[in-house]
Image (cartoon, rainbow, N blue to C red):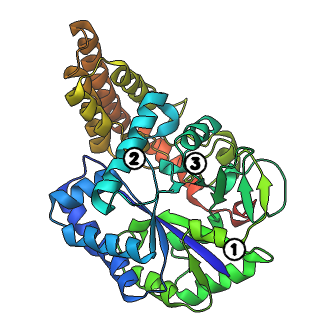
Amino acid sequence: MHIALFLHFYQPPVQKKDVIIRVVQESYAPIIDGLLKDPEGKITLNITGSLLLHLEKYGYDKLIDNIAVLVNRGQIELVGSSVHHAFLPKLPKDQIIRQIRLHEELLHKYFGNELKIRGFFPPEMAFTPQLGNIVQELGYEWIILDTYAKRGAHGYAPLYQNKKGMKFFFRNRLISYGLVTEELKNESMFIDMINRISQDRLYQVIGLDGETFGHHRPGYESILAKIYHSRKIKLHTISGLEDLDLKPYIIQPRKSSWTILDATRSVQQPFIRWNDPDNEIHHKQWQLTEMACKSPHDDKSQKRLDRALFSCQYWWACARPWWHVEMIEAGAHALLNTIIYSHATARYKHKAVDLYHDIVATAFEWMRTGKMQRRVDVEHEYLQIDKSKLRVNI
């Protein structure tokens, strides 16, 4: 069986130093060390610009150098994305392009101007056809998406692409979540699941957060090392899958993301974790985001905006079931500062200040009144993975 393993390394611009240090020690360094020790190991990696800047700031030059070694060996394929992990479908086109181009610039800064970036990872795998068009216009060859991005009832095809030639690789939810939830406790269980569900499939794409291994799941990084070393599967980068001479099937993926477990929501409300129409905090956050994007910026305030667009602030406000009031405040304050330091009018800035205070006050009101906890309690049912539903289109 041919396997492409996609890992996502990310920390937000506002992340604290102690968290960065812990995740590097528990997750990033062991993952990269495992690849250095096993030349057969291969992954496709998204490492955000915000994380690269953290690594440089806190003295992790050796880790960056090791990634560069693996890129040059062909064991790591780096992909394009948003420099600060912005939720791209909700942003204006000029900011989408800027986030993508800035990410490319940092990849070339750290890994060389000759680096070829063929694939694209939309943060949160949040995709719309409009975003796909922008990515294709920027010269990317393929996009990795979630299973539920597949539109229509059709059988398995080894390669999916649109009419203009953009290729789409869909991660297998069942295997990916098996790793996330520790259901697959060792290499043998991983291989058995692949063989059991793959049937006539030529390959599987598995995608998840890199922090799963060692940070969120202590000791789990050892499974990766065994997967690298396994001779029962053949590891590829995603671009390397094209060497299998795949026959294309024409498709236009639909709006989708990668963290909604419920099948109905995955199709009908794929952005609910970041833009819930019933969530007043989300509504206010996106009002402030729109104000920040529309402000008249100079270079300094635009750079503040680049960093302020990170997606975590919306995620942690969803209370479905994740909640983090510090991250909500940090995101709102970052957006506010882009407006304060812009050339907006005093009236516009006062409106932004009021909106910032409203976001923070509403978040604390949700906690004080129990609204946050009620949402969390109800939403926990969606954390129970229905494997029969996850099998759709895998």
Residue at numbered disc 1 = 244
Name the residue tied to disc 3.
Answer: 257
Q: Is residue 273 left or right of residue 213?
A: right
Q: Position of residue 247 (x, y in %)?
A: 78, 64
- Of 266 and 207, nearer the camera is 207
Tell whether label 2 touches label 1 (CB within 8 Å): no
| Place of residue 219 in the rendered image (x, y in percent of width and height, measured from the top left) | 37, 82
Determine whether the residue tagged by mark 3 lies in a helix, strand or loop: loop
Mark 2: which amino acid?
His
View extreme (front): residue: 114
Mark 1 or mark 2, earlier in chain: 2
Tell me the distance, in whole angstroms, between the alpha carbons under discs 1 and 2: 31 Å
Estimate how packed mark 3 is, as few (under 14), some (14 to 19) or many (20 or more) residues with alpha carbons within 10 Å. many
Give neighbour class at mark 1: few <14, some 14-19, many 20+ (Cα, 10 Å).
Answer: few
What residue would you read off at disc 2?
85
Q: Amino acid at mark 1?
A: Leu
Looking at the image, which residue is at 38% across and 27% down? 289
C-alpha distance separating marks 1 and 3: 27 Å
Q: Amino acid at mark 3?
A: Ser
Lower sequence index among marks 1 and 3: 1
Q: Quadrant of residue 136?
A: top right
SS for tag 1?
Answer: helix
| Viewer-closest of 220 and 252 | 252
Among the two numbered marks 2 and 3 on one chain, the one whose residue lies closer to the N terminus = 2
The residue nearer to you, when weighing 217 against 288, is 288
